């Protein structure tokens, strides 16, 4: 077995839209240099988050604006260069706008094909496996990003009411970094627990924020999970900012899983995908600086 000396990180997507009769179509790219057909993907830039890279690379290779949804299996394979592997993170991504992409030396054609027919066109088994995983999951009808507020200092050091404790400067930076990732999901609505630090965490999104104390620390997790499910049934994408002591039992109630560590760092969270109100996927979300 050849020794692997380095791993190149990349990201991309299975980008879909509704085709004739509602069946999904996905976009594939032809690369003249390799004479192949593949899923759109590309290398991460230094310090870039893989989710941001996936959105950027999809647009650069296809001229499709796409919104990430469900994380799909990652792939890892030899690049052909001695000792170099490539690791690619993939998401299913909903196309929201597209235009014909002019051909160039990198991409000769970006083609929409029925998802069920993509296997016959794709050149590589690892791409075909990612598409099979996409086809094996129910269509995502809603996304909820559940996040924990960013750093707000220590409770004992704040002289006023705890609900009025604001973000500290490091927390403000983390909130901006988190909101840059949340913006990739193109939220339709934002909901926050009542404390000021929760509202400030999602403030950089620049969207109206509804306050719902059901997501406050100390609330019954089953009721908070029910409220989150109601938001999912609205469809689209919702961002919910909550607190650290509520989120693990809330997620346990939502998933029915007590064997998963749902503890979440401040300024991080989870992307939860739903199909007609049923939870079908979960994925941690954190800015690069918090890992």
Image (cartoon, helix red, strand yellow):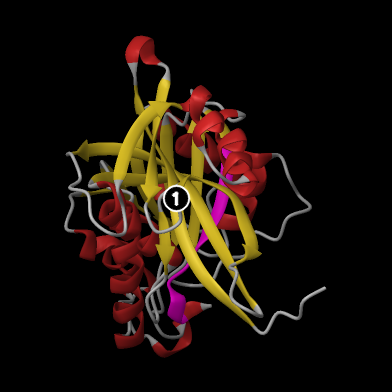
Residue 34 is inside the magenta segment: no
Q: Residue furthest right?
A: 1
Residue 288 is inside the magenta segment: yes
Q: Residue at x 45, y 56 (%)?
A: 34
**In the picture, residue 104 is in which quadrant?**
bottom left
- Return the residue nearer the eye: 123 or 286: 123
Find numbered disc 1 in the image and state the secondary structure of the residue it sits on: loop
Q: Residue furthest bottom?
A: 157
Bin the neighbour count of mark 1 within 10 Å (Cα to Cα): few under 14, some 14-19, many 20 and up.
few
- Total residue callouts: 1
- Return the residue nearer the eye: 5 or 206: 5
Against 157, is 49 above or below? above
Against 63, is 1 above or below? below
Q: Which residues are magenta?
A: 280-289
- Return the residue nearer the eye: 48 or 7: 7
Pointer 1 residue: 35
Left or right of 9? Residue 190 is: left
> Can residue 194 be seen?
no
Residue 42 location (% of width, % of height): 41, 62
Q: Residue at x 18, y 49 (%)?
A: 208
**In the picture, residue 2 is in which quadrant?**
bottom right
Against 9, is 32 above or below? above
Against 130, is 192 above or below? below
Image quadrant occupied by the N terminus:
bottom right
Left or right of 189? Residue 154 is: right
Q: Residue furthest top?
A: 21
> Can residue 269 be seen?
yes
Residue 276 location (% of width, % of height): 48, 23
Residue 199 location (% of width, % of height): 29, 62
Residue 71 location (% of width, % of height): 53, 48
Q: Residue at x 65, y 41 (%)?
A: 255
- Main secondary structure type of the part rendered in magenta: strand
């Amino acid at each position: 077995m050849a020794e692997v000396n380095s791993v190149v990180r990349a990201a991309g997507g299975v980008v879909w839209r509704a085709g004739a009769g509602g069946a999904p179509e996905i976009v594939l790219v032809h690369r003249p240099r390799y004479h192949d057909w593949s899923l759109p993907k590309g290398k991460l830039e230094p310090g870039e988050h893989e989710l941001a890279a996936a959105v950027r690379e999809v647009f650069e290779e296809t001229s499709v604006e796409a919104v990430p949804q469900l994380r799909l299996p990652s792939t890892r394979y030899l690049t052909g260069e001695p000792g170099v592997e490539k690791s690619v993170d993939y998401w299913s991504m909903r196309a929201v706008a597209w235009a014909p992409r002019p051909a160039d030396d990198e991409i000769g054609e970006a083609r929409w094909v029925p998802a069920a027919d993509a296997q016959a066109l794709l050149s590589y088994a690892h791409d075909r496996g990612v598409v099979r995983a996409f086809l094996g999951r129910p269509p995502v009808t809603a996304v909820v990003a559940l996040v924990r507020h960013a750093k707000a200092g220590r409770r004992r050091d704040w002289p006023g009411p705890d609900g009025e404790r604001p973000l500290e400067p490091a927390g403000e930076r983390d909130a901006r970094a988190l909101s840059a990732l949340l913006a990739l999901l193109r939220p339709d609505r934002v909901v926050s627990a009542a404390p000021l630090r929760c509202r400030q965490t999602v403030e950089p999104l620049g969207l109206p924020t509804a306050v719902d104390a059901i997501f406050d620390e100390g609330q019954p997790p089953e009721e908070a999970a029910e409220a989150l499910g109601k938001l999912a049934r609205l469809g689209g994408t919702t961002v919910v900012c909550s607190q650290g002591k509520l989120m693990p039992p809330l997620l346990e109630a939502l998933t029915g899983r007590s064997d998963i560590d749902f503890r979440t760092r401040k300024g991080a969270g989870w992307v939860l995908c739903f199909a007609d109100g049923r939870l079908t996927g979960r994925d941690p979300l954190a800015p690069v600086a918090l890992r």
